Image: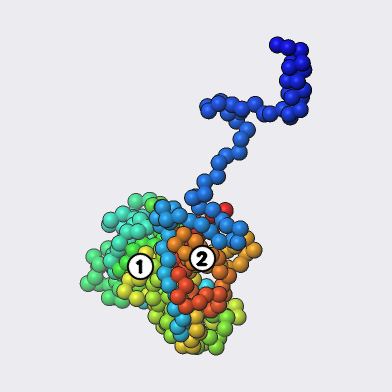
Amino acid sequence: MKRPLLIALCGLVLTFPALPALADDGHGHGDEPAAVSGNGPRRLPDGSVFLPKPAQRQMAVRTQPVTTSELPRAFELGGKVMMDPNAGGKVQAVVAGRVTPGPKGLPYIGQTVKKGEVLAYVTPEAGGHARSLNESRLRRLRELSETVPRKLIEEAEAAVANERLVAPVSGVIAAANVVSGQVVEARETLFEIVDPARVLVEALAFDVEAASDIADAFIVADGQKLPLQLIGAAASLREQALPLLFRGENRALAHLPVGQRVKVFAQSRRAVRGMSVPAAALVKNPANQTIVWVKTAPERFEPRPVTFEPLDGVQVAVTSGLEAGDRVVARAAALLNQIR
């Protein structure tokens, strides 16, 4: 190569900046950013969510249109499941002594018993062999029935009867606080019996005026709305609240244990204008506002801040933030709210 041509080529190389080294397919350096798919679920800059149809089916997203109507005004009360005093009872020891099993042994919790069934005996100590001093005395008096007054025999029979722990009602053993051989005191509660089909719900209302205007009431258990019937209200306050007593309908509360805390949704006779939406549609945004998601396009959802009032535990009454005809996400709203 001639000297002038070599000098020209060298000057041309120095004129252009250095180019980065390129790798062939399969020989990347590993520092390239991951490719972003334009078809995946994502949060858009305006706060709405893009959710393709396949993702909607996978998440089981369901929507429903809303309409404005007159809805009953409701309020929430704290309640507790209670034993019906006419369908349940407690078995207490009348005399002090040692517990011995009944004819069928000591009952277990959950066991069904019938009214009048002997559950156990409370036996006063009598030399360790006789079941009871009272039973021995009764046998002797019966042997001498022709020479002793009838009154003494009846007193001995009553004493023996007091030692028998008998089921006062038919139902299910809810509590068993005794084992064989245990020494108990008089008036100690040993068994509790409950009829699951006849339990009650007691709620405390701090607004006495609202409590006098209850038309319907419900509780929610396992996602189902269970209706309640108001039996009555107390005539005196307890802890500055008015106790209200409700009864379940058609064995609705049979699976709820006595003592369980529940929320009672009481509906008054007054109405509020709003839109009924599922309670599961309500979620929180990063600003801790209550929102619902509204479907504005086949694959686009927008958040709407709303105000609401309780309705029946399953549905709520949205009083502002929505318009008639909006399609609200009624199912999988919490999953939709997590998309970023």
The single residue placed furthest to the left in the displayed view is: 146
Q: Residue at x 35, y 71 (%)?
A: 252
Q: Report whether residue 119 is seen.
A: yes
Residue that label 1 marks: 254
Residue 291: x and y in percent read 56, 67
Q: Callout 2 environment at 10 Å: few (<14), some (14 to 19), or many (20+)?
A: many
Residue 238: x and y in percent read 57, 79
Under tag 1, what secondary structure? loop
- The foreground one among 43 and 138 is 43
**Count of labels in the image:** 2
Residue 193: x and y in percent read 37, 66
The residue type indicated by label 2 comes to Trp
Residue that label 2 marks: 293
Instruction: Tell whether 95 sits left or right of 112.
Output: right
Q: Residue at x 57, y 57 (%)?
A: 44
Q: Callout 1 environment at 10 Å: few (<14), some (14 to 19), or many (20+)?
A: some
* Picture quadrant of residue 6: top right
Q: Residue at x 49, y 80 (%)?
A: 274
- The foreground one among 101 and 73 is 73
How far apart are the alpha carbons under marks 2 and 1? 36 Å
Instruction: Tell whether 263 sits left or right of 247.
Output: right
Judged by depth in the image, the label closer to the viewer, 2 or 1, is 2
Instruction: Evaluate if marks 2 and 1 touch, with contact meaning CB atoms under 8 Å apart.
Output: no
- The foreground one among 54 and 14 is 14
* Picture quadrant of residue 285: bottom right
User: Which label belongs to residue 169?
Assistant: none
The residue type indicated by label 1 comes to Ala
Under tag 2, what secondary structure? strand
Q: Report whether residue 193 is seen.
A: no
- The foreground one among 123 and 21 is 21
Q: Residue at x 48, y 86 (%)?
A: 271
